Amino acid sequence: MTESIQTYLETIGHNARAAARQISRAETAAKNQALLAIAATLEAEAAFLIAENQKDLEAGRQSGLDSAMLDRLDINAKRVKTMADGLREIAALPDPVGEITGLTYRPSGIQVGKMRVPLGVIGIIYESRPNVTADAAALCLKSGNACILRGGSEAIHSNKAIAACIRQGLETAGLPADAVQLIETTDRAAVGAMLRLEHAIDVIVPRGGKGLIQRIMEESRIPILKHLDGICHVYIDDRCDPDKAIRITLNAKTQRYGVCNALETLLIAEGVAPTLLPALAAQLRGKGVELRGCPRTRELVEHCVPATEEDWDTEYLAPILSIRVVADLDQAMDHIARHSSKHTEAIVTEDYGRARRFLREVDSSSVMVNASTRFADGFEYGLGAEIGISTDKLHARGPVGLEGLTTLKFVVLGDGHVRA
Amino acid sequence: MTESIQTYLETIGHNARAAARQISRAETAAKNQALLAIAATLEAEAAFLIAENQKDLEAGRQSGLDSAMLDRLDINAKRVKTMADGLREIAALPDPVGEITGLTYRPSGIQVGKMRVPLGVIGIIYESRPNVTADAAALCLKSGNACILRGGSEAIHSNKAIAACIRQGLETAGLPADAVQLIETTDRAAVGAMLRLEHAIDVIVPRGGKGLIQRIMEESRIPILKHLDGICHVYIDDRCDPDKAIRITLNAKTQRYGVCNALETLLIAEGVAPTLLPALAAQLRGKGVELRGCPRTRELVEHCVPATEEDWDTEYLAPILSIRVVADLDQAMDHIARHSSKHTEAIVTEDYGRARRFLREVDSSSVMVNASTRFADGFEYGLGAEIGISTDKLHARGPVGLEGLTTLKFVVLGDGHVRA
């Protein structure tokens, strides 16, 4: 069985590599036509998608998935339309492929510039939400990449149905259907086999829980675009506008709890903590947020649990906030350097010099002044869409859109030039 | 012993991480002052450097290094000056750190842009040539990175002497000496220990033979900026200018043999092979180049050895050239897709459409029209200097200069903005 899965994956890898060469040179118009055709097919086949999705929902109910999981799995008419609209939005974005920048003459007489090109074959491993099948395929297609999709077993019927629509749309536009391939077995060995396709897959994008991503990091020798944790900080400086500090903290912590750009640790300057923290804490508690504080915080805030060392390194993804009173900006940045997952950090200050230092010195994928960490998102940043968020330093960092799915190559134009 | 080496490396890693935070926020003027102070120190200490280098040369002679190796190891007054001049050139380059691009307002009211920032700590593992110690340290310093240097054991005295000058120059400029640390043991276990410093080192740059790089790839979980092979192709199209074809082929193959951007396989269109190949082959043979050809090549060229399948996948780094006659551009690009190491490929053609297709469709780090593959080089491309050449797709591709040693983070400027 394992051997036949390996063979199956190798065939998929081989087909993807061949399709990647074709899709990399496809005209922008053909790629857009395919995206629109896929959108139309999804809408035309809505009844089929919903029927297939029912099989997954039924199996999910029987295997005891909780209601949040079942909701994420659910496809209804409105969600089909959202998927189709997402594809149309990606069709409307500029094509990043082929742009040449910086083409200048060198003293030798050659012209040198850089051309933006697709990465090749993207492998995407994701859980439950079947709309990722359409989103991820669309981003890869528009950026000229082939993709291999491995969705969660609980969504297999939904994913197969969506993938069938995608392949039909590709064929309508005269593009190779193998540019988007779904792994159709739910055997868990398929992930391992996929991670061994070093020669066929250029980048793996894992989307899911920390356990999934850690497993992929351990097993894969293929480069990964990922983030593991979102331990995001807000630092309230003593030269802040208190209203902005409260508004930003509440939004960053409570607008949504289970997201990677939510606030997890609040740092607040000693100079402003006694006046600001009690009121802020009351509002947070009013929203049902559990507070865990350093000793100084507990002097200022009622009903505050002691924070342990572990709290500073924990991504709660829940209505819990750890709070530490710090002496100043330097101590705040030291705390961030030690405990941040390098996802997103924000300072609240009206002091120009401190804002400038925070922006420069904090080493995270997004660094903000007087704005909620919740803005760290491809749509909010104007990328049009995102395939994920990277906290790695190489290649793409922060929300990853079409540009992050491309790379640059040098182009050299000569007229018989040789090196002296 | 191994345990103490691991501890030694961990201390180095810890120091590097601390120094990286300081050097990342150093003013451009301080970094340039350090580079100029290092240059001055190297020149002032030339006698010391040469004396220390003599120890390495003596040991090298006794251990039977060949004359080419001894020449690469040698430091004389002229080479000290070249090293110092290299540092001054890097001081004169623009500082890439802190540049903010694309800062625009979003519909939400926040401003979003990208800031160029250092990678953090670079680990460089290299062989024999001691000037790499100065070059690599200077590139890392200018780009705001700390570095950990592991040179070859045959150059240990030379490297220690150069590193001492570098640390003195850093201190003169008020920068932390630990921004540049040389591993002072020649124990081979140090490389393994270095590759385990996942939390202290952001990127490994291996410079050396294929064996070294393969070993590092196998052992390291730290991202690597590297190239393994340089199997470069020139394709001579039937619509070429024959003079340019001959000039470019001769330069690409014979200007230097042991370099990664030298030509290894010549592809030539059937339409022009009978008229062009005999004359070209004669000139190559006149320079002492051994020719290995496909059956059609051997019909056209005298004294041509049969090329095996293995030849198409071989980087000779020697006066040997494999030659294949192809039907057309498509067959040439198929051959390249199959056998290229994705380093550098060139087409010789006067046909606009074919040049355009070759530029777009060939997936290598440098793609050229009517120019010698030998141009694939950081200096020739105007990067000022290079730390290496990458054939990987993520992050930096092609010659890697200061920009390749940096990454981008998102910066967000708000005025109390929260997400709706």
Image: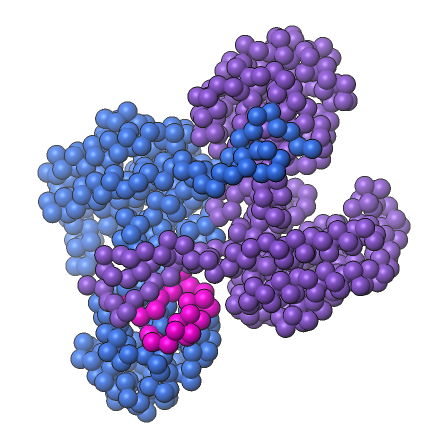
Chain colours: A purple, B blue
Residue at 45%, 79% (x, y): give it: B331
Quadrant in the picture for residue B332: bottom left
Q: The C terminus of chain B is located in which quarter?
A: top right
What is the x, y in percent for residue B184?
30, 38
Residue A148 locus on image (x, y percent) = 64, 61
Boundaries of the magenta span: B348-372
Residue at figure coordinates x 78%, y 46% from the top left: A72
**Residue at x-position 64% and y-position 13%:** A277
At which x and y percent is residue B255? 21, 67
- Number of numbered markers: 0
Classify A359 as above or below B71.
above
Q: Position of residue B268 (x, y in %)?
A: 35, 81
- Does residue A221 appear in this view? no
Above-or-below relation of B12 to A193:
above
Q: Is residue A223 rendered magenta in the image?
A: no
Q: Quadrant of residue B77?
A: top left
Which residue is found at the position 34% from the left and 44% from the top?
B402
Residue, far bottom = B299
User: Does the magenta portion include B366?
Assistant: yes
Give the side of residue A213 with respect to residue A403, left or right: right
Q: Nearer the viewer, residue A154 or B316?
A: A154
* A304 left or right, relative to A266: right
The answer to whether A270 is drawn above or below residue A159 in the figure is above
Along the viewing direction, whichever of B45 and B255 lies nearer the viewer:
B255
Instruction: Say left or right for B192 vs A316.
Output: left
- Residue B74 seen anywhere in this rendered image of the structure: yes
Query: In which quadrant of the rendered image does the N terminus of chain B lie?
Result: top left
